[in-house]
């Protein structure tokens, strides 16, 4: 899994993925403290993430294991909104 921050949205009215009512978000890969790495991806959002949220991404064939994405050509999926990150008993990031 990869940590990323939601930076924006992506709208594509003509698609061949077959996902009903998809919500694609532009995300930037981050380190464990939430600092951006300058690497951007487009991810299908199934959890309701908003701009600025830190999220967990999954990539590859595991993205096609949900009911919404079963056998669809999806490569990056937002699977969680991060609440906090603890590294060595030190909070390095908190949502609120």
Image (tube, rainbow, N blue to C red):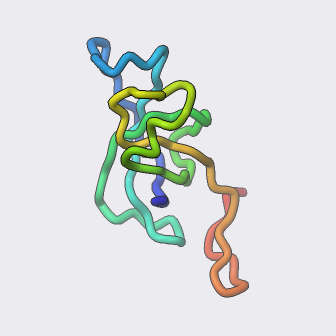
Q: Of 76 and 94, which appears nearest the observer? A: 76
**Relative to 48, 21 lies left or right:** left
The structure residue drawn at horizontal position 54% and vertical position 51%, both measured from the top left corner, is 55
**How far across and down, in percent of the image, does residue 88 sit?**
66, 87
- Residue at x-position 63% and y-position 81%: 87
Q: The C terminus is located in which quarter?
A: bottom right
Tell me: residue 71, above or below residue 60.
above
Nearer to the camera, 1 or 27: 1
In the image, taking residue 90 as reference, residue 69 lies left or right, namely left
Q: Residue furthest bottom?
A: 88
Tally the numbered discs.
0
Could you say where residue 54 lies in the image, as x and y percent from the top left? 55, 54
Residue 37, compared with residue 10, is above or below; it is: below
- Residue plotted at (61% across, 36% down): 47
Q: Please give the name of the residue rendered at 45% of the width and 41% of the height, measured from the top-left corner.
A: 63
Q: Nearer the viewer, residue 60 or 79?
A: 60
């Amino acid at each position: 899994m990869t940590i990323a921050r939601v930076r924006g949205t992506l709208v594509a009215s003509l698609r061949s993925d077959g996902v009903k009512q998809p919500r694609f978000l532009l995300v930037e890969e981050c380190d464990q403290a939430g600092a951006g790495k300058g690497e951007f991806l487009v991810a299908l959002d199934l959890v309701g993430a908003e701009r600025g949220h830190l999220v967990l991404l999954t990539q590859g064939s595991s993205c096609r294991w949900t009911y919404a994405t079963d056998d669809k050509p999806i490569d990056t999926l937002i699977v969680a909104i991060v609440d906090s990150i603890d590294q060595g008993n030190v909070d390095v990031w908190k949502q609120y």
